[in-house]
Image (cartoon, grey):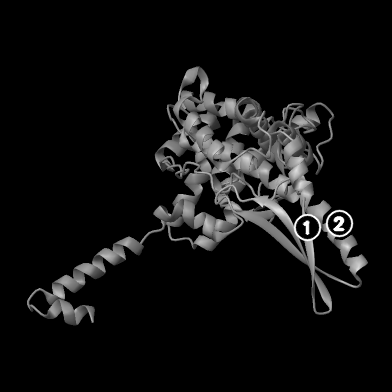
Amino acid sequence: MPGSMRKRGNSWELRVYAGTDPDTGKRKSLSATATGSRRAAQRALSEFVTRVDYPHRMAAQTTVDDLLRDWFAAVSPNWSPTTVRQNRSIVDRHLSPKLGGHRLSTLRTEDIDLFYGQLRRSGGRGGHSLTAGTVHRIHVVLHGALAQALRWEWLWVNPATNASAPRCEPTAIYPPSPEDVNRLLDHVARVNPDFHAFLSLAVSTGARRSQLTALRWSDEDLDRGQIGFLRALLDAPGGPVLRPTKTGRTYRVHLDAASRDVFVRHYRRATRRAQNVNANLDRTSFVFSHEPAGGSPWSPNWVTNQFIAFREQAGVSFRLHDLRHFMATMMLTAGIPITTVSARLSHARTSTTLNVYAHAIPGGDQYAADALRAILDRTQASPDGMRRAIA
């Protein structure tokens, strides 16, 4: 890779050819400054050439599969088991078969756009099309791997940055009605009081399944009617594992009187079961457990399967996660401040709550409609009234 240097006052300007821009076809160069003697500047230029040439050599030697393998090994230990499983599936089913053999040096935005188009047309099982949301998730994984190549200085440009990934439209939220929630709770209360306690907490706190299954008795404060969510239980290939909550935050919520009573009764049942077999139920025991001593928690997948069975028996059709949406929408509809609801949901930002549940905030649109009607009514009798009212 050629380089040049020239004297600029008391320093030296170093310039190195850095290839051709794949979009414009123009030659690119990078510059740096060195000080000292000509010999020192020549050494600095040699080091600069080596450093600039490194991404080109790596890109020429490395395939997309090589990058995906090294990227996955480096960053996946920081992911949740669910993210590991989902990203592994995307790499194995889509990225490696179609793009894995490409050299990084030859991968272009055009190649990625053609790949996304093929996925949309026939990338699914049996040649069926993939949804925009699925292709968008594939784009996120590919872009993340190529971004890691930039951080490792294997590339100068991320070809996925300007790729035309399909837009991922937000999923519509349809929370269950209060009547359906009560129908489910009434049924489960009759057939399984422990699972009724679990569902009661899901309804009143809006906590995620992973947070509820991870609860220990040390997390409750029944005297104050509070529950703390400090961790999450996630399904993994080797069995459920405890991890930080989805947002990495810990928080506490208050229980209403009825939910507190349900929780107290659950504690008394758990205590009696432990005493009946001479087991020790202590503060480290899990709140929801098949074992009298609470040594291990309910599996998240078992909870979902049990919920589906009870849902069918009760004749309702919503998902377990919809109880979280139910709590949020009912509170917002009742006029609870969005900052309070956001904290109860443990969203990292209030804007997240607003983006998801803006439709449930009452008053704003009705006020706008009434204000417009008032303007029309005040100006109906005068041809120039509208202009004066708006002014």
Pointer 1 and pointer 2: residues touching (CB < 8 Å)?
Answer: yes
Task: Note whether residue 240 is visible.
Answer: yes
Nearest the camera: 242 or 21? 21
Q: Earlier in the sequence, mark 1 or mark 2?
A: 1
According to the picture, the residue beneath numbered tag 2 turns out to be 46
- What quarter of the picture does the C terminus occupy? bottom left
In the rendered view, does 254 fall on the left or right side of 364? Answer: right
Residue 13 position in % (x across, y down): 78, 69
**CA–CA distance in space, label 1 to label 2:** 8 Å
Residue 121 position in % (x across, y down): 44, 28
**Which residue: 61% across, 37% down?**
198
Would you call the spot at circle 1 few (<14 residues within 10 Å), some (14-19), or many (20 or more)? some
Residue 176 position in % (x across, y down): 43, 40
Q: Amino acid at mark 1?
A: Gly
According to the picture, the residue beneath numbered tag 1 turns out to be 3
- Determine whether the residue tagged by mark 2 lies in a helix, strand or loop: helix
Would you call the spot at circle 2 few (<14 residues within 10 Å), some (14-19), or many (20 or more)? some
Q: Amino acid at mark 2?
A: Ser
